[in-house]
Amino acid sequence: MFKKLKVLLTEFSNELTQTNQLESVIDFNTGLAALLVEVMRADSKIELTELEKIAEILKAQCELDQSQVDALIEKVRPMVEEALDLHQFVKEVNAKTTYEERIEVIELLWHVAFADGHLDDYEDHIIRKISSLMYVAHVDFVGAKIRVKESIEL
């Protein structure tokens, strides 16, 4: 019995170590890219227009070239798929941004959600969740959505 318990505790410890190592490699660019990819994945459809919008955002906001953007997206896709929650990504973005910049991040997420010409309920939900984790007030969450929607004239 004690051997089984020891094995379980060792496995749990190894999982915690892997999680801590994963969190330590997350910088602002990785955190932002992961949140953008999570919005893209929310409706279970990966559209080329959404990938292109993410690339455009990362080039502009993170000052990356196309090869760096491609590498970053390839890096974060499995991270997002394996993540239990979004906290590890949001934590890094929150640490590096002011409140106003967090509202801008929410706007970027809306741009990805609207990139395919259709806002899915799951995309709306995940952005709402991220907004809450970023401590963005509901009024600013809604304002960001309206501004983006009006800017692309859906």
Image (spheres, rainbow, N blue to C red):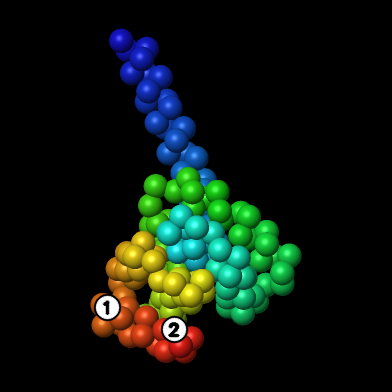
Q: Which of 91/84 is in front?
A: 84
From the viewer's perspective, tell me whether residue 75 is left or right of residue 80. right
From the viewer's perspective, tell me whether residue 57 is left or right of residue 124. right
Q: Residue at x 32, y 12 (%)?
A: 2
* Location of residue 38 with respect to 84 vertically, above or below: below
Query: What is the number of the mark on residue 55?
Result: none
Asked if residue 43 shows in the view, the reply is yes
Q: Residue at x 38, y 52 (%)?
A: 85
Badge 2 vs badge 1, beta-carbon distance below 8 Å: no
Q: Residues within 10 Å of mark 1 (few under 14, many from 20)?
A: few
Q: Quadrant of the N terminus?
A: top left
- The picture places residue 70, in percent across and down from the top left corner, at 68, 62
Asked if residue 130 shows in the view, the reply is no
* Location of residue 142 with respect to 40 vertically, above or below: below
Q: Residue furthest top?
A: 1
From the viewer's perspective, tell me whether residue 153 is left or right of residue 131. right
Q: Amino acid at mark 1?
A: Ala
- The picture places residue 149, in percent across and down from the top left corner, at 41, 84
- The picture places residue 42, in percent across and down from the top left corner, at 43, 59
Tell me the SS state at disc 1: loop
Residue 90 picture quarter = bottom left
Separation (CA) of disc 2 from disc 1: 24 Å
Q: Amino acid at mark 2?
A: Leu
Query: What is the number of the mark on residue 137?
Result: 1
Q: Residues within 10 Å of mark 2 (few under 14, many from 20)?
A: few
Q: Residue at x 48, y 45 (%)?
A: 82
| Residue at which label 2 appears | 154
* Location of residue 25 with respect to 12 vertically, above or below: below
